[in-house]
Image (cartoon, rainbow, N blue to C red):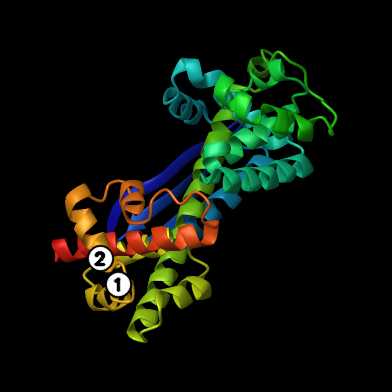
Amino acid sequence: MLNEIQYLISLDRPPFEKGKIIILKRSNGYETHWSYVSGEEESLETLYSGPELERAWLAAEATRQARCRDGFRLQTPHITFYLSAIPKPFLTVRKLECFCSKHHDANLFQELREWRRTASNAAKVPPYFIGTDRLLSIIAALVPQKEEELLQIPGIGQTKLDSYGQEILKITNKYPQIYSFPLDWIQRKVSEEELATWLLEDKIKREERHQVRMKQELEEKRQMLEAIEDQISIGNILDKMSLTMVQFLKRIRELSRDGYDVLPYLQQEVERIKEKDQIVDLVSSLGNERLKPIFEKLYGSMEELPRDEKGEKYNHIRLVCTYLQIQSAA
């Protein structure tokens, strides 16, 4: 039974050949088809049929690339559809992202990613707070050499320039600058067809990454359920699965929402925390939206405390808060 069309694009090859790549969602899985029309001749080729959406997308993308190499071109409705969703003020930014994704220096991009990892650890913020992969790709393509060039890059304002500008320039100054500033040439360099195709490819890649993440999360949940059943301590689970406490507790809350009884295991782990009663009382009076007030009431500011020890105490508070949340929802 056909539930919906997941994906459809039309291609043509003058003077009279036309084709469509289609992904269908059915009750038992997915199908990818290539529909071809030449004159009065019409054929339908099944490229994939099975339970995995990821493989259906891969079959569609491989076919699109192969047909374009054979001279087929995406039809205008495809371009109009993908560009219509972009507000005009952002069209230049999307063209810039498109160009830089294809022309960045791979070595510089990797060096920027390594710098970002160090900077995010030092600032105790997620890496994307420092800069997304897309922003690093733009920097690695345009290779700014001075502050005024950095400020022309979307995503870098004065605050980010003040915080990280000199560190970024210290890296980019080691590489040659191929493309010029200002960046008004981008509008002419990237055609609407190229942009629309890139947006479609980016959508497929994001869907593939989403599918990979879903599989990883399912595997993590399976491992966690086995570990909980075997009464393995949280510390050992974190080491075995290479998780942080925040990631572990997120998975625990998901398991609880899915109907798994994780309370007995959490209660057992909470009982090992000697300050658990004080934490419970403070959560009752202060709430659990912010952990710092609870921490300071328990331990003071403790600015001189080693990072690992401070992190462990915060994790105790996180664990108790999660236990109380799940308990109240039960």
Residue 276 pos. (x, y %): 27, 67
Indicate left or right for 246 with 162 as reference: left
Q: Residue 182 appears in which quarter of the rendering?
A: top right
Nearest the camera: 301 or 73? Answer: 301
Q: Residues within 10 Å of mark 2 (few under 14, many from 20)?
A: many
Up the image or down, 297 lies above or below 137; here it is below
Q: Residue 151 appears in which quarter of the rendering?
A: top right
Name the residue carrying label 2. 323
Q: Residue 7 appears in which quarter of the rendering?
A: top left
Which numbered marker is on residue 270?
1
Indicate left or right for 245 with 191 as reference: left
> In the orientation shown, which residue stands out farthest toward the bottom?
230
Query: Mark 2 belongs to which amino acid?
Result: Tyr
Residue at the spot x=54%, y=55% of the render?
58
Q: Secondary structure at mark 1?
A: helix
Whether label 1 touches label 2, CB < 8 Å: yes
